Image: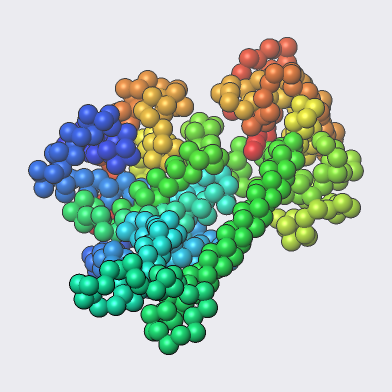
Amino acid sequence: MPGNHSRVVFQFDAAAHATHRRLVSRLAEGDAEAMQLFYAEFSPMVHGIVRRMLEDAEDAREAVQDTFIKVWSQASSYRSDRGEVVAWLVFIARNSAIDQVRKGARRRRLHETLRSFPTETEYPAPEQPESIAHHLIQLSIPQRQALELAFFSDFTQSEIAKALRMPVGNVKNHLRRGLAKLKQIVARHE
Amino acid sequence: MNDDFHTEAFLYLLKKLDPADHAAFEARLARDPVARAALAECAAIVAQFALESAPAEAMLPADQRATLAAILSHKSTNPEKVPQRLKWPRYFWPMAAAILLGLNLLQLFRSTPPISGQEPMRHRPETSRRIPDNPTTDDPLSVSVAEEMQHLEQLRAEYANLEYAHTRLQAEYDKLLHQRALIDQRIGRFAAMELVDSGSYARGERKGLVKIARGLLTEPGIVNLEPGMSPATQQPQNQLLPPSETTLPAQTPSLGQPYAWSVFDEASAQGYLNFYNLPPVEPDRTLQLWVKPAGSTVYQNLGEVPPPASNGSGRVSYTLPGATQPPTEVLVTQEPRNATPSQPSIGTAVVRGP
């Protein structure tokens, strides 16, 4: 959303990733204290994601709860060779929010916001020039919009094309180039 | 790995691949560690993007505690443990009956005199086949059976109590659901939205007028607002929300910027728009009102907005045609006079919302 660019950027170093993996191992063994630590560490992050996707605060709260229950019950299936814990958690949170939508929760109309977003206005520069946020403004607006609609609105490429009023081929290009640019940005930042 | 693989990994992570492609991708991941590493990289990139796009937002402390409590209480619903909990009441009574039967049989054989080969079993005393109703004998087996039965009775009573409590809670839950449905129905009759200029709209700045509007609504679609008074400064007589709910957010456009607020009464399909600080309208231009109905992607023109007063304020009401859905967006633009625009012209928005 426009106007939300001075924010905490979640950068975790190798030690933090190792700590997260240990926590997930403890969760797999049913350690309640580990769950409290995990929740304290990640609940604002999870809430931020589901709040972006769901209109109603109560629905978002339920999605947060559902996310951590899934983490609790699926901890033993976590595979570190397919991604860090943070990434694993982000996708669980996203899927929980989508589940809420399928159960009848109202989704934020992200595509309406994006379509009416004035394209002539650039994203304002963040306060910390070295943050990821600073680099992410290098994404073109269509690239960012396509990525946001795919991730937060669970749109197919056809739905993105319809929402952004462009051919599906262009959407595919924006997604591919957007991901490539993100890869460069993150690589430069590391 | 190339960009195409990242795109495919992205769609895999979002569960947007066809079933066949999904299975093929899974198979590749299973056999190729390089593909797994590339997937992990893609997941990290997308997660980073998501976290940047959706800033962390702490829940209210009370919600946070309640959510954690609910999660921790859900521990017992781990996949391995749920079936055990569910099976207990189902199999308890048959098991108890089997134990009792076993005890009966045991007692039957124990109370039988030693078989000498000459005395048949039918000569056993009749009373020894039954469990005594009121065991007062010194027979430890009879006492044990009586204790078991007493325990069984206790369990039966506790189970009945639990069933009763469950029924009562279920009834209360249904009642709450019903009340919530009624509230939702009432709230659904009104739609209040706030309109600001394009700059404030892009920055996400709002005056919090929607909250105020909810406090000012007295009748369907009627806003208790005196002409010329700014809603930000008015003290409503029938305020339904506590005063703290009407405080303005930190990011507030300056008072000189145009803004408006709108209330839509779904029952009568009628909308009301109050606007303030609108800039002067050029002689060759008019203000046009547009709405975007729910489910639609195009704006619908509702005609000309009456010229605002010298201080830029005014109000207008409109009625949507019968089959039109309630508006999800309201827009006021400046359009050339004598033109009949089918869609709002780019760059002419004066106020927009929500």
- Residue B137 x/y as whole percent: 46, 85
Query: What colouring style does the render use?
Result: rainbow
The front one of B181 and A92 is B181
As drawn, is B238 to the left or to the right of A72? right
The front one of A22 and B3 is A22
**Residue shown at 21% from the left, 45% from the top:** B39
As drawn, is A29 to the left or to the right of B285? left
Please determine whether, in this image, residue B323 is positioned above or below residue B222.
above
Number of numbered discs overlaid on the protein picture:
0
As drawn, is B278 to the left or to the right of B145? right
**Residue shown at 61% from the left, 43% from the top:** B200
- Residue B46 x/y as whole percent: 32, 46
- Residue A135 x/y as whole percent: 34, 49
The front one of B273 and B64 is B64
**Residue shown at 80% from the left, 27% from the top:** B268
Q: Quadrant of residue A25?
A: bottom left
The N terminus of chain B sits in image quarter: top left
Given the current orientation, which residue lies at the most extreme front position?
B118
- Residue B103 x/y as whole percent: 36, 71
Please determine whether, in this image, residue B165 is positioned above or below residue B298.
below
The C terminus of chain B sits in image quarter: top right
Q: In this orientation, does residue B51 appear? A: no
The front one of B159 and A91 is B159
Q: Quadrant of residue B308?
A: top right
**Residue shown at 65% from the left, 58% from the top:** B168
Q: In this orientation, does residue A162 appear? A: yes
